[in-house]
Image (cartoon, helix red, strand yellow):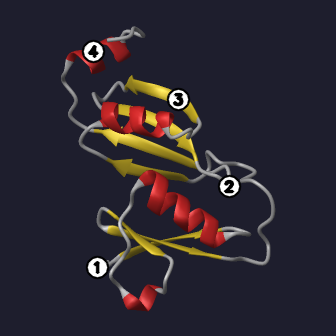
Amino acid sequence: MEVESTVIGITSRDPQRLYEWYRDTLGLPVAEDETMGPTALNAGGAILSFGVHSEISGPAKEPARHLNSLFIADIDAEQERLVAAGVRCIRDRGREFWGGVISTFVDPDGNYIQLIQLHPGDATHEAAAAGQKA
């Protein structure tokens, strides 16, 4: 299979609110693709599209089942920015066995968002891996 593009549909009872949160709080840029409609955002090489679904109600019942993972260059700065903005962090940044660092947040609908930095190497990451403050 040759995939030409990737669109991740995120459904919500209030897709406009969720779209605005991903745009304004996470800081994802608006997708310049008119076919995706007015509530689409760029997330690296993928597009996040927000819409409604008749079978959706309340917060995500199993938020760990589907993880929105965003690979970023500076997990320290992004975690600090999101925490300062009041975003709920459920997993402080920590080094994984494969060498990367992951931090997990919750969006307004209860979905999990993982921030991942693949190649950390500064003192902050070393301290986080050891469970200490840098």
Q: CA distance from mark 1 to mark 4?
A: 39 Å
| Mark 1 or mark 4, whichever is nearer to me | 4
Q: For the residue carrying disc 4, how many other residues have a C-alpha within 10 Å: few (<14), some (14-19), or many (20+)?
A: some
Q: For the residue carrying disc 1, how many other residues have a C-alpha within 10 Å: few (<14), some (14-19), or many (20+)?
A: few
Residue 71, compared with residue 1, is above or below; it is above
Q: Is residue 58 left or right of residue 21?
A: right
| Mark 1 or mark 3, whichever is nearer to me | 3
First reached walking from the N terminus: tag 1 or tag 4: 1
First reached walking from the N terminus: tag 1 or tag 3: 1
Q: Which residue is mark 2?
A: 109
Find residue 2 and name its label: 1
Where residue 123 appears, as percent x and y from the top left, is 22, 15
**Quarter residue 118 falls in:** top left
Q: Which residue is mark 4?
A: 126
Q: Which residue is mark 3?
A: 91
- For the residue pair 96 and 76, the one nearer the viewer reads as 76
Residues at discs 2 and 1 in contact (Cβ within 8 Å): no
Q: CA distance from mark 3 to mark 4?
A: 16 Å
Q: Which amino acid is tagged 2?
A: Asp
Q: For the residue carrying disc 2, how many other residues have a C-alpha within 10 Å: few (<14), some (14-19), or many (20+)?
A: some
